[in-house]
Amino acid sequence: MRGARHSLTVRQRTATTDTEGRVSYSNSDSTVRGSVTMRGVGVLEPGERGQFAQQPTCIALVPLGTTITDNDQIVVTGIDSTINGTYDIESIQYTRLHLRIALRGVPS
């Protein structure tokens, strides 16, 4: 349902590099109440053609007090098989009522 609130997981990722230059991440998860919806695909950017089937794009709305950066991920579960998954954050927009987060699906 549009505008419904769900539990979303904010995954804060901390990168560490070993002596050989390999990067590994440690995750710290926190849960927030927010909403998520699929982004409209009416207008395609030239670089996005053919990518929507592999990497879904969504918009998440979370409370203003949420601590989040563009290096974090959003994990969506329990909504719908089309939307459920892990998403990288493309951008964060501050509004008067919430944070509007543009998401791009992580290939599985």
Image (cartoon, rainbow, N blue to C red):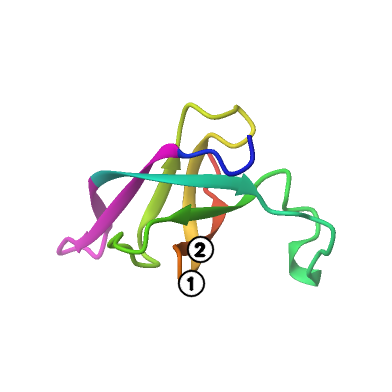
The answer to which image quadrant residue 62 occupies is bottom left
> Was residue 64 drawn as part of the magenta stretch in this picture?
no
| Depicted 70 relative to depicted 40: above or below | below
Residue extending farthest right = 42
Disc 2 crowd rating (10 Å Cα; few below 14, some 14-19, many 20+) is some
Q: Mark 1 is on which residue type?
A: Thr
Q: Nearer the viewer, residue 25 or 52?
A: 52
Element under label 2?
Answer: strand
Picture residue at 26% right of the left edge, 53% below the top: 25
**Image quadrant of residue 33?**
top left
Q: Earlier in the sequence, mark 2 or mark 1?
A: 1
Q: Are marks 2 and 1 in contact (CB under 8 Å)?
A: yes
Residue at image position (64%, 33%) is: 82
The image shows a total of numbered marks equal to 2
Q: Is residue 17 magenta?
A: yes
- Residue pointed to by mark 2: 100
Q: Is residue 64 left or right of residue 24?
A: right
Disc assigned to residue 73: none
Q: Is residue 108 above or below residue 19?
A: above
User: Measured from the top left, where is residue 1 in percent x and y?
Assistant: 63, 34
Rendering coords of residue 106 (x, y %): 52, 48
Number of residues whose C-alpha sits closer than 10 Å to that of mark 1, classed few (under 14), some (14–19) or many (20 or more) = few
**Please, is residue 71 above or below residue 84 in the view?**
below
Q: Give the percent coordinates (x, y) of residue 63.
A: 38, 57
Kind of element beneath mark 1:
loop
Task: Point out the stretch of residues depicted in magenta.
Answer: 6-28
**Residue sitting nearer the eye, 92 or 17:** 92
Could you give the CA–CA distance between mark 2 and mark 1, rounded to whole angstroms?
A: 7 Å
Magenta-drawn stretch, dominant element (helix, strand or loop):
strand
Residue where numbered disc 1 is placed: 95
For this rendering, which residue is in front, 34 or 82?
34
Residue beneath the point at 44% across and 46% down: 34
